[in-house]
Amino acid sequence: MARAVTFDERGPVGLMGIDNPPVNAISHSVRCGLHDAMAQAAKNPRIKALLITSDGKQFSAGADITEFDRPQGEPSLQQVQTAIEFSSIPIVAAIGGLALGGGLELAMACHYRVAHKDAKLGMPEITLGIIPGAGGTQRLPRLIGAGAALNMILSGTPISALEAKDKGLVDDVVEGDLRHAALSFCERLVQEGRGPRPTCNRSVSDSLDEAEIASALLAHARALKGRSTQQLVIEAIKASRLPFAQGIAIEASIAQKSLASRESLALRHVFFAERESGKLSGASTIHNKRTQTPAIQRVAVIGAGTMGSGIAVAFADAALDVMINDNDPASLTRSREVVSSTYASSVRRGRIAQSVADERIRRIRHAHTLAEVADADLVIEAVFEDVETKKDVLTRLDSALPAERVIATNTSTLSVTELARATAHPERVLGLHFFVPAHASRLLEIVRTEHTSPESLATAFRIAKLLKKVAVVSRDAFGFIGNRMMLDGYFREAEQLLLEGATPAQVDTALENFGFAMGPQRVSDLGGNDVGTKARAQLFKRDSRPDPYFVIADRLTEMGRLGQKTGRGFYTYENGSREAVSDPEVHNLIEKLASDRGIRRREINDEEIIERCILSLVNVGAMVLEEGTAARAADVDVVWTSGYGFPRHLGGPMFYADTLGLSHVLEGIRHYHEKLGHYWRPARLIERLASSGSSFEAWDRTSASP
Ligand code: T1G
């Protein structure tokens, strides 16, 4: 077994160095290494104190998540912590970078903690649908109080070293060389005769009363909507009032329960799926081995509209230099205003300091000639969504740039293949489909054509990593992955339900109760009904769809009811408010459209709304897979959880379909196919998987075509 922990002596201090790249996860080999190092130190009378340090950026990202679904060899993390806590000599943790989950729990079992001022300490377990399972719910309350511990665990987000010191979680915050400072701290302990200080022997200073629990739940209600782990966290923290041995046993039992929950299986599925989606086997192999993609420091964005400006901000946020080019001075002026207001809003919300905003704004230059575009390491066009306009831009870029430089198009509706063929080097052209707002949305669809080279693809993955976006590769087809499923499945069914008798508020509320961040009609009003109408018109140049296909949204566009931006859409928005108020005029319009189509309206319950919207989404998702537009079902889950508000704790549409069982899913699709006709035709992949009792997860393992 590779040595995941090194051991050195520094005078009276034994140095235990965790070395388990890439994030120092506390794997079995790390636990064995710590156990062996402590045994080695125990035999050495010169050692009077021990220091746990780590190599690499992180102190530790926590327990090794890849071990969760298999027996975890001894010693367990709890056993290592007990050995630390009852050591005869003091043990100190030197925290640099991130100390998360089991990593922080390991540090809390130490007698003292020294953190670098840039370190961050957190308990993100709840983001994986589990509770801290290595004493976090018992030691954290003993160190910072039960109320503070509850909020820190429910939030799942790390706190700074200084905040940790203020709370009593760390004993010292240092600058400069952490290891040197921590060694000095240990030497002082020895000189001063300060021995072990078992955290488990402390008592909890405060009790969790109902008011405090309610306020903590309210503070995290939005992030924990539809979740259940928070109740388990509360139960475990309450047990910290008991003697430690009892509390830790209760925590262990609750932790096992959380680990087996569907919520945790779904969240862990998404966690790993987001990392796998950026690793299309061919390109990432090339990226990692043969092809060292060129460094990317300067980016040119062609087109100073909303998307272009948002993309520029995304790159400036990633500390890259950006040139926004537009031949219309007025557009450049508007873009400067958009960039400034975007950063002003981030400063106003406390997301970044003014100095950071200023530095990023300085990274963005506006130019009206393409003269300097040849200096860019990457060029993205985000000009008007018109095929001839984009072809013209790509042709000019193609001749201005060296042949190996990647040219990306931000189109969301046009054929990337057709655009690429307007160049002499289609192998370097691909789509980078950003989602509005480009600087904030996590998802980036990378659209490959049959010409796209692995090297270009590898560059696109590198860009996604630089932008901290979740990358999913789509082949070039109608709506790529997300919009294809939204248009042909989910949103289309929502409109059908309106024609058949449901109201916008009923459809939206039903789907928001299911777990979507926002229902389809509210999303359409937010983005603009005209934006959808225009996109569908463009898409229809590639591949048309039979009526009724968004007849309501298109009619609202014709009426100028564009949504929030005009104060009226599917709903009305009084005096610029964002609150969606139902509008009888829209109900009358829908009734007329239904009547014109001979549709007899009826009462529709929420269960039918959810079933039809979700099953249609899954069905089209399966078509996207069988057509090869998406390589894996897990990629489809990533698209919908990171880009379209599908509830993460349900794992994404394809994972959710697996939990329902594909036979049940197929039965529902067939039922609606008989009732509603052609566009409910069951995807052949679902028929095949259902008939063999298989699943999308199994298909990914055996047949996915990355
Ligand atoms: N275990 C195993 N592998 C992990 C891991 C972990 N905890 N964290 C990251 N990885 C892998 C990841 O899959 C990827 O692998 C590589 O490391 C780089 O990750 C007992 C039970 C730390 C902020 O929830 O949030 O402790 O794709 O791409 O963007 O109570 O990783 O290269 O093969 O994300 O720089 C609690 C999860 C665990 C933290 C770094 N800890 N990790 O982000 O790199 S549960 C967490 C992260 C626990 C205890 C409980 C991030 C990061 P590959 P990356 P990054």
Image (cartoon, grey):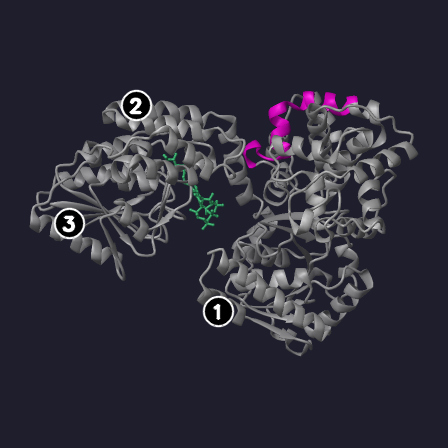
Residue 80 point in image, percent of width and height: 26, 34
Between the C-alphas of marks 3 and 1, the distance is 43 Å
Q: Nearer the viewer, residue 263 or 29?
A: 263
- Magenta segment includes 432: no
Q: Are marks 1 and 2 in contact (CB under 8 Å)?
A: no
- Amino acid type, callout 2: Ala
Q: Is residue 632 left or right of residue 219?
A: right
Q: Nearer the viewer, residue 171 or 207?
A: 207
Q: Are marks 2 and 3 in contact (CB under 8 Å)?
A: no
Q: Nearer the viewer, mark 3 or mark 1?
A: 1
- Amino acid type, callout 3: Val
Earlier sequence position, callout 2 versus callout 3: 3
Q: Which residue is mark 3?
A: 13
| Secondary element at image label 1 | helix
Image quadrant assignment for residue 516? top right
Q: Which residue is mark 2?
A: 249
- Amino acid type, callout 1: Glu
Q: Nearer the viewer, residue 104 or 145?
A: 145
- Structural crowding at the residue carrying mark 3, measured as other residues with C-alpha within 10 Å and reported as few (<14), some (14–19) or many (≥20): many
Res. 454 mark: none
Question: Which span is picked out in magenta?
Answer: 648-671
- Magenta segment includes 670: yes
Q: Residue sitting at 68 percent across and 28 percent down? A: 610
Q: Main secondary structure of the magenta part?
A: helix
Q: Is residue 281 left or right of residue 43?
A: right
Q: Quadrant of the N terminus?
A: top left
* Label 1 CB less than 8 angstroms from ligand 1: no
- Viewer can see residue 71: no
| Secondary element at image label 2 | helix
Q: How many marks?
A: 3
Residue 258 sits above or below residue 6 on the image = above
